[in-house]
Amino acid sequence: MLSCRVLGPTELGAGRVVLDLGGPLPRRLVTALIAAGGRPVGGDALTAAVWGDDPPASPEVSLQAYVSRLRRALGAEHREALQRVGDGYRLTGAETDVAAFEAGVARGRELLDEQRPAEAVRAFDAALRLWRGEAFADLDGAVEVEAARVRLGELRLVAVEERLAARLAVGDAPGAVAELTPAVRAEPYRERRWELLILGLYRSARQAEALSALRRVRALLADDLGVDPGPALQSLERRLLAQDPGLLLPARPGPAPRPVIKAPAVTRPLSAFVGREGELAALEATMPATRLLSLVGPGGAGKTRLAVEYAATRPDGDGPWLARLADVTEPDVLVSTIAAAAGVHQPAEPGPAGLSSALSGRSALLILDNCEHLVAAVADLVVELLARCPQLRILATSREPLGVDGERLLPVAPLPSDDAVALLVDRIGAVRPGWHPDADDETQLARLAEVLDGIPLALELAAARARVLGLGELVSLLGERFPALGRVPRGALAPHATLEAAVAWSVDLLPAADRALLLRLWPFAGGFTVEAAAAVGSDLEALSSLVTRSVVSADTTVTPTRYRLLGIIRAYCQEHDPEPAASRAAQAAWVRALVERTAPELRGERSAHAIRVLNREVPNLRAALAHDLVADPAAALRTAGLLEWFWFRGGHVAEGLRLLTTALAGAPDAPALDRALALATCGTLRFIGGDVDGAAECLWQAKALLAEPDSQDGWRLVSQLRYYESLLWSARGDYDTAAVRARESIAVSVRIGERWAAPAGEMALGGALTGLGELLESRRVLQDAAAHASELRQNWIAAMSELLLARAWLAPADPDPAAALRELGAALGRFREEDDVGNVLSCLHTGAYALTLSGRPELGATLLAAVRHQGARRGLRPEATDPTTSAALNNALDQALDPVTRAAADAGGATLEPAAMIAMLSAGQEQSHARR
């Protein structure tokens, strides 16, 4: 096994032997290949890495000479690790000290989280010993590795700090202080080091020195940077002054924010990316100064892969976001698809205006993939987004331009001959271990590339067949399939015709059973799982066979594995499926079964899991509902009604309301229970959208349909409707009626033996009692509701009960901010477990009021500004969910703060990320506890 060391001067080893790499230039070549992590590096990029701005007259010849020398140094056992790809090279199969370091740091953190600090110290020590100097030292000054060098340097600093935190947790405070003093001196602006030093001094019975260190860091940050210490240091200061006995415990200090290795928003495929150096260079040069660029070319030319390769490695403060539009069949869902890609939970207002508002302050790259079937709708939306979002840039892929003013085009043509051959060599090598083309193979490869017009998808399909067919056989079979195509000018329509013929050829070569299965998979939109494919007669073995032949792709980075048909293959299957109606019906039946099985979980302990499952299947939900709205409107009505909690918790309020309205109109004779459920769901969605009158009308209609329920399900829905009515009357300010309806809901649940439904009614009752001013009773009811829901593992109802209880503790007649902060901490933890971003922000919004009432208005104003900023980014308005608290909070801040202080707090809050906001609330809770 080859071992590569680049955390210092570059070393390449084979077993225990360190190889002689020669002088500085071949060392730079090896370093550049190692830095690529097994990906091919083009000739131009290698030339720049090795020689910088002063290349030799014939850099290709010099590179070949260095490569030959390196292969000799690698020896017979490892020479094949250095491979030629196109006009460049790649180094494969090597272990690196970078990967070992990252794994060691991750392991140390895991051990700390598991309360095993002694083992964590050893893990961090082993990871840090791998460093022998600067990362990629032999490429000093090379911009190609600067981002990786900075990232690794930051992770090294964090590892040093986490190791010292582990040493403190072991109980060795004096030893930790001895190391922390020079560590603080080396990096004086890293607050985590000051926090650990101060804590170590305190635990070493050096309280005066700990307080002195606090004063020094506060003065340093104020004088040099003009800022106050962050929430963690402020919390530590308050605990020191209060002589909190918890500081003496040898437990690990609270975890520092982890700035390291954010998972990329766009994940590149595992296969090598071949060619396209010119197009990538054009993207890198053009996109930073361009608002809209469209990659335009024929189907299968590699537009999506090019966009993904560009996006996966670029630095981006917020994004990049990839919106796959191939499965979007209606312009109505274009906005919600892009919103989901950008992490916008639910636009504050519907349509393009709401999406533009949510993205207006965000700086990111948005990729709109496969626009050709929605060109007009995409163009209109792009104009709106670019006009209202000045920091947004858009990269589109399409077979035709969008036709928008200011659009720049980058044509993506089929691959030139050399790159096409290189792609074939790479892909065939992947299915034929140990294969290397000889002279005859090179001739056949060139012929293959010519026949397939250099279209990457066609080349991939052909290469997949090389596992069972010789190259000569492939050329012969393709010659029989394409006898009339001949040579055509590039840019003509022939490449698309070639691709369609290549798809047909590849499908026709499948065994009969595999071909029949493939033709039935097209109704699945947005991908599918093995379980879903079973609905059309598939199993894992059959899917694996299709993946092996490259007609189906498999994404193994998610669990469960997700399979997908490329757009051109899906279109071919739809056109050639002998029974398309049966295939669509089978997909719709699978979706109905999924919803029937998953919907009950939305209210219980697996609600977060259910939301994630259904969010993955949104394109399939849309496809099935579109089918059923035509073929079986009553079935569509029931499915849409069962998805009630998913529509609002998954951020699909507008879409759910549209589908329900259509289904209600199309199924007037559906069973009364299903119509009542759909109307109740419409009422919920209208209520969340702010249409209280419309919500009331839906609830009254549902109630009329269930005047005399004749089933357990009917009575269960009656209980649910009473609960919804209670919330509605509270929103209208009629708390007496709200309390009556809540008690009716509880009574029905108890009478029919559905005690699991009672906590929701109890929660509504507690909220109504708060409105009536019966604070002692409301607090008792809400506390019992939270306990009852927790006992039944209804995490979301328990969290909402705790949030309402916190608000009850803030009632003007008898406020107790410390009690409110305690409940908010519990609710916040539950909502985070549920992935409920909207209610996390609601907790923080209420927390801003609690901090203000506890005598810390500046913190309250800062947190409020942060909530507003984060809400706007996600299309959420936390203030709208609790107008009473919003009005009281703004009034309290106006009285407590002068305009200058308020403006400074607003500016500080706008820069806070969610982790810092939560830490601020936690610090407020700790201080309130200390005061008590």
Image: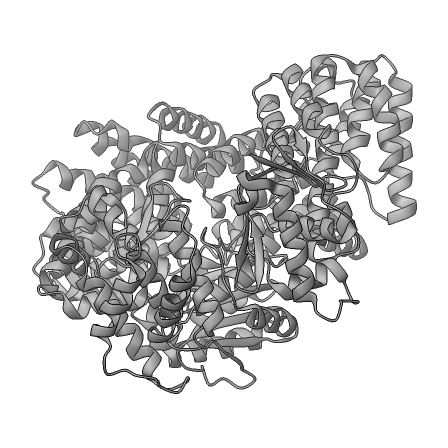
> On the image, which quarter does residue 211 sit in?
top right
Above or below: residue 278 compared with residue 883: below
For this orientation, the residue located farthest to the front is: 439
Give the camera-side residue of 774 and 46.
46
Locate the C terminus and report the quarter of the image it occupies: top right
Q: How is the image coloured?
A: one colour
Query: Where residue 435 appears, x then y in whole percent?
Result: 40, 50
Give the camera-side residue of 358 and 515.
515
Above or below: residue 108 compared with residue 259: above
Residue name at image x 50 percent, y 34 percent: 827
Query: Where residue 738 appears, x then y in whole percent?
Result: 35, 43
Q: In this view, does 535 lie to the left or right of 405?
A: left
Give the camera-side residue of 755 and 493.
493
Q: Is residue 724 left or right of residue 166?
A: left
For residue 613, say whether it is visible. Answer: yes
Residue name at image x 40 percent, y 36 percent: 796
Query: Where residue 71 appears, x then y in whole percent?
Result: 61, 47
Give the camera-side residue of 495 and 439.
439
Q: Is residue 64 left or right of residue 562?
A: right
> On the image, which quarter does residue 568 sit in?
bottom left
Locate the N terminus and report the quarter of the image it occupies: top right
For the image, the number of numbered tags is 0
Above or below: residue 914 compared with residue 243: below
Residue name at image x 41 percent, y 81 percent: 400
